Image: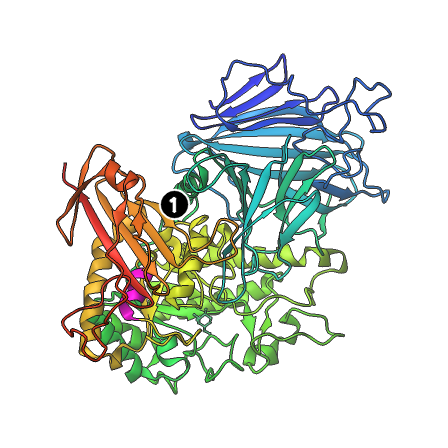
Amino acid sequence: MPVKYSKKTEQFHLYNDQVSYIFHVLPTGVLGHVYYGQRLPLDRDYTYQKSHMNHVLKVFTADDESLISYEDTLQELPVYGRGDFREEALRIHYRDGSMMNQFLYRGHEVVQGVIIDTSVLPQSMPNNKDEATTLIVTLKDDYRKVTIEMFYTIYEKLPVITRRMKVINNDTATIAVDKCASLNLDFSEANYSLMKFDGAWARERHVAVSDLPMGMTSFGSTKGNSSANHNPNYILLQEGADEDQGCVYGLSLIYSGNFEASLEINQYHQLRAQIGINPSGFNWQVEPGCSFLTPEAVMTYSNSGLSGLSKANHSFIKCHILPKDHRKEAQVLINNWEATYFDFDEATIIDLAAEAKELGANLFVLDDGWFVGRKDDYRALGDWFVDEQKLPNGIRHLSDEIHKMGLDFGLWIEPEMINLESKLYEQHPEWVVGHSKYSMSVGRHQYLLDFSNPEVVDYIHKHISSILREANVDYVKWDMNRVCSEPNSMTLKPENQGEFGHRFILGVYDLYKRLTSEFNQVTFESCASGGARFDLGMLAYAVQTWTSDNTDPVERLSIQTGTSYLYPLKSMGSHVSAKVNHQTLRKTSLLYKSHVAIFGTYGLELDVRHMEEKDKKLMREQIALFKAYKNLIHEGDFYRLISPFTPNGTNHNNLVSWMVVDQGQEEVLVGVYQTLAKPSPNIQRLYLKGLDKEAVYREQLTQKTYSGIELMTLGYILDDFFTGIFSEMPGGNKENQPRFGHGDFTSKLIMLTKVK
Ligand code: DGJ
């Protein structure tokens, strides 16, 4: 069992080949943290590693300065008000109005596998019990009659440990949990920089790296979803760590609602890192005999820099987060949104599907606008009945026609929303999120349905499941296009209003759980105005996420690079859209767009009916190429060769390159992208990664051979850059096809195969 407990020293050591996580019971009975990082020898006592110094003027746990001061003791569960003075991980209000408590070690248990929570909170899952071990440590406050269970799950083959905590109320009065972080991780030093993933609509998950100041740094979401502004995830880079080397820690939350990440450096230059439900506006009433369980947090460690961390994140998500029981993953889809918006009828859809089928697509997705009265985004959300004006023969007929063509059929839904102009609002105005005495803010002309109310979830489940059955769907795109303001339920009891945000997201998970269980052969893709809910919570139910509404390939280079630190390529929705991009109006070639989209799930989002024959030919080739390389792209190891972000995450590099290599180091696919052409450039080389040093690789296009070590150390030389006469200019050679580096927005795919 990868948990070693020493009765003598009361030291716990969680370990596998790659990591050690060590804590112990302090003389006071509180849990003290010792170490997390590279694997250490097992049979040693590390508890001498005290983190505290006996400075005067600190407060100590007793009037003896050789005892403990929590001010600089590393802890597993720092609570409010007990002389720590840093950010607490747990804050509870008791019946006497006080927040005082003390949770002391009372016992522990080690179980094979994970503890499966019976609620709807998403969690990581081993494929069989042997892949994970869980340590449950029990702490008690006897006066308060409250028990805490701390869960630590270690995955045997990955540098990953997850954490959760449960608050159990054995008292006869209700307690109020004001803050309950999923994890608290104390470091004895503060020599780390912070990497986080920030953005906005159409600009999600841009890399931001900064030094940490003394005091508190925090970020999160209060928008009801995890948001496009900050991802529920961050990375700590130890001084000197970079893409390929050094110690890095990734902390993330399996959660899609309001979260808070906080980092604090105290006066002794120690770092405290936390992540959990955002305490802003949060308050959970735990009634006698009941408990509160936090979302699960994930800690990933790498001593080979960010690329090692991404690899561990990708493997963990693929093996232990993504749902397994859907029929087909990542079909090449065509989505009609940017081709038609709301303006379509049955004939248009059939034509689009037929053209897409001819190009090689396997799935047609009918986006927003198919339900009664939905001619624009002002109305009809909540009324999940087919619009017979647009689809007079019904949705089943359309789905049957599409299936007859040999395509799968997918449908867009936005279950959490309502427009005031809808039958549902006429019947149930009290089901809207807000307060009856105050005006409600509006976003995209729509409002949130109160998913904290199980009656609402039941109603939506009934109607959505009925339409999905009727339409015989193979795929569902679940959208969410406004954030939560006026977070108030018109049906929750007054004392439970502080639970609204968490209850809302539990309602969303409940609906996900019901629909994905009933339609367990259907692929679900989550979406929130693009990538505003790209998180591990959603991925536990929906195997892929629409990465961003922005399909401009130049923008996607940044968005997909940022996303790749955290999430695997097979979860990133990526489509080829019109030559003139609808979000930026930037014009780029279909080839460039396709080369970017290929590092994701790949799909089409443009009007294929009106394409020139040469473009159709190109798209046929590109779709065939994606299908040929899909397994490598989705299951191989991904590397960022050149990031669009400079190390401090501010400026953008002009050249970007990504690669994938399979686990056997046999097949390699490299994408390289130039944004703007530059005159008289230097020779550009790509230094490949993860290859077999001894092997010889042949480049598919040129048939040139290279050794693995050569490609990784000497590099692969990109074509000479051309800044002279372009083929399109008067006097230019028309035969001279533009090559990589000729002009703005050019790209190239390099395929290599091991020959010996
Ligand atoms: C926002 C999504 O991100 C788009 O792809 C599209 O589905 C629209 N919503 C439809 O309203």
Query: Does 361 appear above or below 42?
Result: below
Query: Does 212 appear above or below 617?
Result: above
Q: Which is nearer the eye, 375 or 737?
A: 737
Residue type at mark 1: give it: Lys
Q: Residue at x 29, y 40 (%)?
A: 712
Label 1 CA crowd tier, 10 Å (few <14, some 14–19, many 20+): many
Residue 100 on image: x %, y %: 81, 37
Query: Does 582 appear above or below 109?
Result: below
* Residue to which mark 1 is pinned: 318
Find the magenta span and give its range. Answer: 589-596
Left or right: 654 in relation to 461: left
Tell me, yes or no, if residue 551 can be seen here: yes
Residue 704 on image: x %, y %: 14, 47
Q: Which is nearer the eye, 32 or 418?
A: 32
Quadrant containing the C terminus in the rendered view:
top left
* Number of disc labels: 1
Q: Residue at x 63, y 53 (%)?
A: 219
Left or right: 651 in relation to 143: left
Left or right: 625 in relation to 79: left
Hey, which residue is sitting farthest bottom in the picture?
A: 389
Residue 298 on image: x %, y %: 52, 41
Tell me, yes or no, if residue 545 can be seen here: no
